[in-house]
Image (cartoon, grey):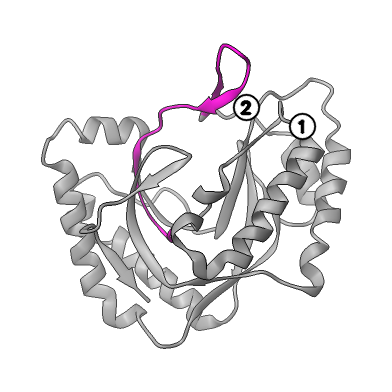
Amino acid sequence: MTLPDAYAAKFQHIQESPKFVPNPNGVRQAAPFPGYSVITPPWQDDRANDEFYADLKTCGRQLLEICGSHLFVALPPDSLHLTIADLIWDSAYRDAAQNPEFEGLLRDRIADTFRQCETAVTSRTPIRWQIIGFMVMTRAIGVCLVPKDEQSYDRIVQLRRAIYQNAKLIELGIEQQYHFTAHVTLGYWGEIPPDLDRDRLSQSLADLNHRWLDTSQEIWIQRAELRKFDDMTHYDRQPDWPVLEF
């Protein structure tokens, strides 16, 4: 996914993201897109990974220079995070939220899941994943991560398995939608011009990937938290919401 040939293929199929829409002045703003996920704390709440996220902030600026503001919509740096498990969003969330007890049940059952898998995934050994390059998606772009060692991979996969195989969560409409491709989303695609120079963009991304050849950036995963979002720029939680300390 981080090779030039992959970029060339992906850029043939990128599409405008409905998660950001133009306002009357033509500036793209976050559209309503509510839901819940289990994520690492966003940068604003994760100062232990300052160097990691500062590098991604720089990457966002570089992407903006390469792509332009009409094509690329950068996410606020403070909101950057790693998603461990998507739970429920958009129309599925709106339907489920018709039940006034849904959100309380979701929090309780995620808390139970965290308690059940606490022994299996917690350890004094840190969980570290490193950036290997940019990742072009149909409606977004980010950086792709790989685990530094086997236990870093296993503990995240075990947590995901505990979430998606929890029968009480499945009862709430929580189901696994995707295989796990660890990444941090940096922004979304805006207007796709008909004369987009896809070859130039592919080569530019490949060139930018050289930044991680000599000095790789790592994220230290210390916490998994249940967070609620109303759009793709804010991820909120209350102090008593479930959290799993690694």
Q: Quadrant of residue 194?
A: top right
Q: Quadrant of residue 94?
A: top left
Secondary element under disc 2, as helix, strand or loop, is loop
At which x and y percent is residue 141? 65, 44
Furthest-bottom residue in this view: 124
Q: Quadrant of the C terminus?
A: bottom left
Would you name the residue on which mark 1 appears?
68
* Residue 71 sits above or below residue 158 on the image: above
Q: Is residue 42 visible to the viewer in this orientation of the structure?
A: no
The residue positioned 84% from the left and 22% from the top of the image is: 195
Q: Nearer the viewer, residue 182 or 31?
A: 31
Q: Is residue 186 visible to the viewer in this orientation of the structure?
A: yes
Identify the amino acid type marked 1.
Gly
Furthest-left residue in this view: 101
* Label tally: 2
39 drawn magenta: yes
Identify the amino acid type marked 2.
Glu
24 drawn magenta: yes
Stretch of the chain drawn in magenta: 20-42
Instruction: Say left or right for 122 vs 111.
Output: right
